Image: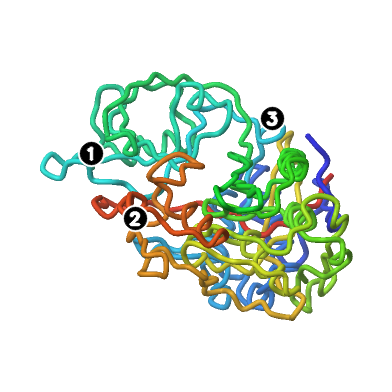
Amino acid sequence: MRALILFILLLSVSCANPPYSGIDAPSSSKPATDSELITYIDQRLEDEYYWLDEVNQKRSLFNRRLPWDEYLPNALSKLTTNEDDGYYNNNGQRGYYSYIRELSSTTRAEVKGLGIVLHYTILIMDRENNRYGFIIDAVYPDSPAAIAGLKRGDVITMIDGKYLDNSNHVAMFNGIVLNTISSMNIEYLRRSEGGEPYTATIDEGFYYENPVVYSEVIEPSGYDKKIGYLVYNGFESEFDEELLAVLTEFASEGVGELILDLRCNGGGAVNSAIKLCSAIVPNSYEGELLCVAKRNKKNSKMPESSEFRLEHTGQLLNLNRLTVICSENSASASELVIMGLRGLDFPVRLIGQTTEGKNCGMDVTRKRIKGKEYEYAPITFMCFNAKGFGDWGEGIVPDVDLTVDNEFGVSDDYYPLPYSDWGDAHYDIALAVALADITGSGISQSTRSATSSDIAIATTLERPWVGIRLYSEE
């Protein structure tokens, strides 16, 4: 696997160490892996969790007889001061940003599956017959789904000859999202082409979850600058070369404006955010402070604060402003880019919807136990920009809100549901408004009518979250 940039020292937690002092060991009847992982979880919660004071007060309430993969959320649920660590889904159930997971043996996020990212809102296609539809949010480049011709905005209505309905949609949805379906025959609609049905057969295969899902250079008529358009769906260090390659190509083509589409970007690695911002701004910003990570004063493993500065600026785009497309799904490192640059008085214009509001992050470590590798990321810090501002926990309000009436005369009650593929400025009102905002042009009447106002929503399932991550590496 590519070496990750070191931001913090690796916590030395040997598998041979005795149970962490002050922590009750799990029942001896539990598997050894559970015992070691629960000790690992407890160790970092006591030493580093941002709300470690309450952890140390209430650790006697933690149920150490649970399996390791149930233990962390159960322990966090006993706390009351950690409201910023998580969210509530539509059913009022609490989820947490902190996580521990087993890592796969593959590298560079190579996975075996179909390559489809589904939007978490389910459509009602036929209310009388109770038929549903899955909206495709993105298709990974070179994945089986891409090879089969699927695109963002397509709506899946049938799988293996069965309509999606309230009896099967959850299992089908999870099968696609979790890559447990090895093959499927589907019927789908492309709304931007009149809703005519298409069919496709998709067989699982290996592909990379490359977050750089789309890029192009746009040359608007009557505007004197080329505009780079980049869709970036996750700050993943393993794909920094792909990110910088696109920005390098933009620079070689003389791009003078940039639209950064983060509407599907839930966050990721701070080092990737630093590289992205550094590639955008002029060299006058070299060494400027983008953000500060502030930890609990009683954190015994990490310094109370860590600073992250821009470096190698002015070598690529040399822009004087940035336009960002955002949504409620834009979180964590996406918000850090926006607020970090604004903290340096670099103009950032937001088009879309109020963002998620996640200004906390994780120091991430990895540990090998019984031949398997685990990644553990408890919330350990809050993030602040150069002006000392970090209060975006309620989300960042856009300059142009596409969910309400605005100066461009376009809005969509169901934004950011996709209507068409990336780069389609005719049917994508976010891209159309971003281009109009930059160039000072208007929005066509046909684009004004290309919204999702005619759809019906069945339900919205739980969304995954990433978080601001600072990596350690063995």
Task: Find the residue positioned furthest to the left.
Answer: 128
Badge 1 or badge 3: first in the primary sequence = 3
> Quick check: 11 left or right of 408?
right
Q: Amino acid at mark 2?
A: Arg
Residue 231, percent from left and from top: 59, 46
Q: Return the residue nearer the eye: 35 or 463.
A: 463
SS at mark 3?
loop
What residue is disc 1 on? 165
Q: Return the residue nearer the eye: 62 or 226.
A: 226
SS at mark 2?
helix
What residue is disc 2 on? 448
Badge 2 or badge 1: first in the primary sequence = 1
Residue 396, percent from left and from top: 55, 71
What residue is disc 3 on? 106
Badge 3 or badge 2: first in the primary sequence = 3
Q: Is residue 177 above or below residue 44?
A: above
Q: Quadrant of residue 176?
A: top left
Identify which residue is drawn at 34% across, 34% down: 190
Identify which residue is drawn at 73% across, 74% down: 345
Residue 51, percent from left and from top: 66, 74
Q: CA distance from mark 3 to mark 2?
A: 45 Å
Q: Amino acid at mark 1?
A: Asp
Q: Dot 1, crowdedness within 10 Å: few (<14), some or many (≥20)?
A: many
